[in-house]
Image (tube, rainbow, N blue to C red):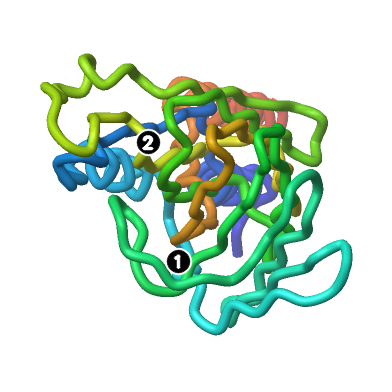
Amino acid sequence: MFGNWKFLTVLLVSGFVAIGSAKALSVHAGADSAASGVTTNSENAFTAWQGDVSSFTVDDMTGISCVGGPIVCTTGAGNMFTQGAGVLQATSFSGGVVSGPNMLLIQENIEGTFTWTLAQPANAFGFFAFDTDGQTITINFDDGTAQELMFASAAEIGCTGGTPACSSDSLFWGVTGLAQNITSVTISALDEPGFSTWDRFVFGATIPVPAALPLFLSGLAFFGFVARRRARAATA
């Protein structure tokens, strides 16, 4: 039969092993050259994002269907994309990092927006996009926080010219370690002359950081001290 202090020690060990602590927010981004068709930077960023998550779902936009006004696009993975400014439509396109079924945001020379409602809460998510032409993208989370992404210049990603002209408009962007789970994200992007293509939305759970060993050892020492006090009291 376990004594009380031994039972509490077992609970302490189990708690530290199971719970761990939250991992700090990390952003993974990579932009490619549309002219060369090379997707090394974006795929490397996606690989790094995957290294931070314990499980995730890839929504490759299979079964995408857009209806209504405001337009709502849904996919086979259960994600929902709702029109803000601009027009959403289902499409099939191959270019840069997007291929097959995609979602097209027609912006008509304005800042286009859409809200992505996740199929399930997550503290890690990301997306691939094409033809955003080096503009700033703002990502607003439903927890009230936001991130902003501006593409590197063509020169910074090793693009040396050609036909069509080089541009850093093909990318992956992802975040892990959000302070709490989110259920929706509003994405804003400005493109000239006015359309961008979005594909392969990913969402999942960030790997927790194991609990600190010093804190664990302090807990053991505390319960050991309690046990000694009780033993001395029993023999007094």
Q: Is residue 50 visible?
A: yes
Q: Earlier in the sequence, mark 2 or mark 1?
A: 1
Q: In this view, which residue lies farthest toward the right?
A: 69
> From the viewer's perspective, is 169 left or right of 157?
right
Residue 219 disc label? none
Relative depth, front residue between 147 and 32: 32
- Evaluate if marks 2 and 1 touch, with contact meaning CB atoms under 8 Å apart: no
Disc 2 to disc 1, C-alpha distance: 21 Å
x and y, in percent, of residue 102 in the image: 49, 66
In the rendered image, the vertical position of residue 65 relative to residue 232, given as above or below: below
Foreground mark, 2 or 1, reads 2
x and y, in percent, of residue 92 in the image: 44, 72
Q: Secondary structure at mark 2?
A: loop
In the rendered image, the vertical position of residue 118 relative to residue 33, given as above or below: below
Q: Determine the residue positioned at 49% across, 42% down.
A: 208
- Image quadrant in which the C terminus is located: top right
**Callout 2 environment at 10 Å: few (<14), some (14 to 19), or many (20+)?**
many
- Image quadrant in which the N terminus is located: bottom right
Q: Which residue is mark 1?
A: 58
x and y, in percent, of residue 156 in the image: 23, 15
Identified by mark 1, the residue type is: Val
Q: Is residue 21 visible?
A: no
x and y, in percent, of residue 8 in the image: 65, 46
> From the viewer's perspective, is 72 left or right of 2?
right
Q: Determine the residue positioned at 38% across, 73% down.
A: 100
Q: Secondary structure at mark 1?
A: strand
Residue 169 disc label? 2
Q: Determine the residue positioned at 48% across, 21% down.
A: 150
**Callout 1 environment at 10 Å: few (<14), some (14 to 19), or many (20+)?**
some
Relative depth, front residue between 193 and 46: 193
Identified by mark 2, the residue type is: Asp
